[in-house]
Amino acid sequence: MHIGFITSHFPFHDAKSVGGIGTSIKNLGDELVVLGHDVTVFVYGQEKDDKFIEGGITLIKIKNIKIKGLSWFLTRKKIQNIILNENNISKIDVIETPDWEGISSFINLHCPIVIRLNGSDTYFCHLDNRPVKWINKFHEKRALVKANGYLSVSQYTADVTNQLFKTSKNFTIIPNGINTNLFSNDGTYNEVKTILYFGGIIRKKGVLEIPHYFNQVIEKIPYAQLILIGQDMPDKLTGNTSTFQMMKELFSEEAGLNVKFLGSVPYQEIKRHIENATVCIFPSYAEALPVSWIEAMAMGKSVVTSNIGWSKEVIDDGIDGFLVQPSQHSEYANKIIQLLQNEGLQKELGIEARKKIERKFSMSIVAQQSLLFYKSLIGKF
């Protein structure tokens, strides 16, 4: 089978910034190649047009067309034509695209198009209590209505999406997955009490709550370290150009001395930072099904996350991680302190977390589920 993916970012060798969608497609694409299938990824929003093969995946970079008032339409038609040209070279059986900004809204192909919900702009604006741009909502709904097949990484995201767009699509739930051989841990224990957050430095990820937790942690464990990894982003609510600068102002003087902000790091280095962490924290207010959570859990790390919507589809509270409302600062801090002070509890949650990932989020399982869905859809098309 030849599977194509459309995305705005992907972790190829010279990628400048990669989010969860690109990482998810990379993980799935790698496994599909191992299983003997052809994979082509069409990456729009690039600095130039290019085509190359990396890790067995054919990557096609697409530069957007920029003409005021027509960019959205002409770029979509350019993507369409490039896919049709590739189809003439090697027949593409199915194309998968994320729901974000409805990139497939005006793309017409000779094969089925699958929408996989990873969270649209409409969805995230809803969770973040912000107004959505009408043009984004228009494209996202049009793409959803035009699609031939429907996947979602979580039931929560599927339910909220149907509610927001006033649709009743029947979504098949297939979660994000990871390579459990790549993300594994030999059981080594780091003596330094290290708290790790990795993800976007943006309000919706709950990062402005983190200083409040760490201030309380430092009062009990003065030598604890906090490491922050991710791209610093502007804050849309206040207009501040740096969310990290907003965070810095919230740390106590003592806590601030023990904070390291590493900014964006290459995806290949994330594993090392997870390995060195004692506890990983993810107090997010807006997700679909975060890859970062399952990466940390796959490496046997104890995690403290938010308790919103999708979270219960990833974690069983108190068994393979802790779920806490992000705004409950003392409760969140107490869970972190409990884990930092109890190596046995760390390991107990970490072992169960690893078992959960192997059972439910291993890419070998997710890829097989996706293939069955593709084959069923192609048979009906």
Image (cartoon, rainbow, N blue to C red):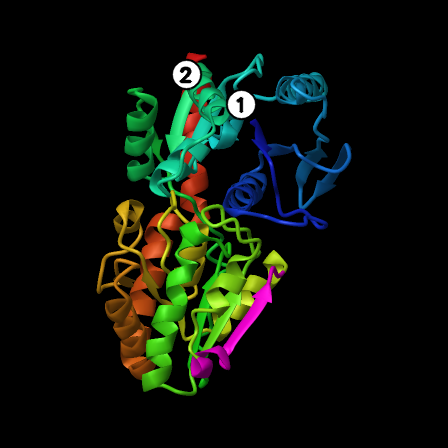
Judge from the rendering whether residue 330 lies leftward or rightward of residue 254; answer left or right.
left
Q: Is residue 224 above or below residue 285?
A: below
Type of amino acid under label 1: Val
Tell me which residue sits at (72%, 20%) in the image. 89
The answer to whether one can see residue 184 in this image is no
Q: Are marks 1 and 2 in contact (CB under 8 Å)?
A: no
Q: Nearer the viewer, residue 78 or 240?
A: 240
Magenta residue check for 204: no
Q: Secondary structure at mark 1?
A: strand
Q: Nearer the viewer, residue 310 or 184?
A: 310
> Residue beneath label 2, please?
145
Q: Residues within 10 Å of mark 1 (few under 14, many from 20)?
A: many
Q: Which mark is residue 369?
A: none
Image quadrant occupied by the N terminus: top right
Q: Secondary structure at mark 2?
A: helix
Q: Position of residue 205 (x, y in %)?
A: 42, 53
Judge from the rendering whether residue 239 lies leftward or rightward of residue 356; answer left or right.
right
Q: Nearer the viewer, residue 238 or 272?
A: 238
Tell me which residue sits at (71%, 34%) in the image. 61
> Residue beneath label 1, please?
94
Query: Which segment is the magenta one?
Result: 253-265
Q: Is residue 223 above or below residue 362?
A: below
Q: Position of residue 79 (x, y in %)?
A: 66, 22
Q: Position of residue 159 (x, y in %)?
A: 28, 32
Tell me which residue sits at (32%, 85%) in the image. 220
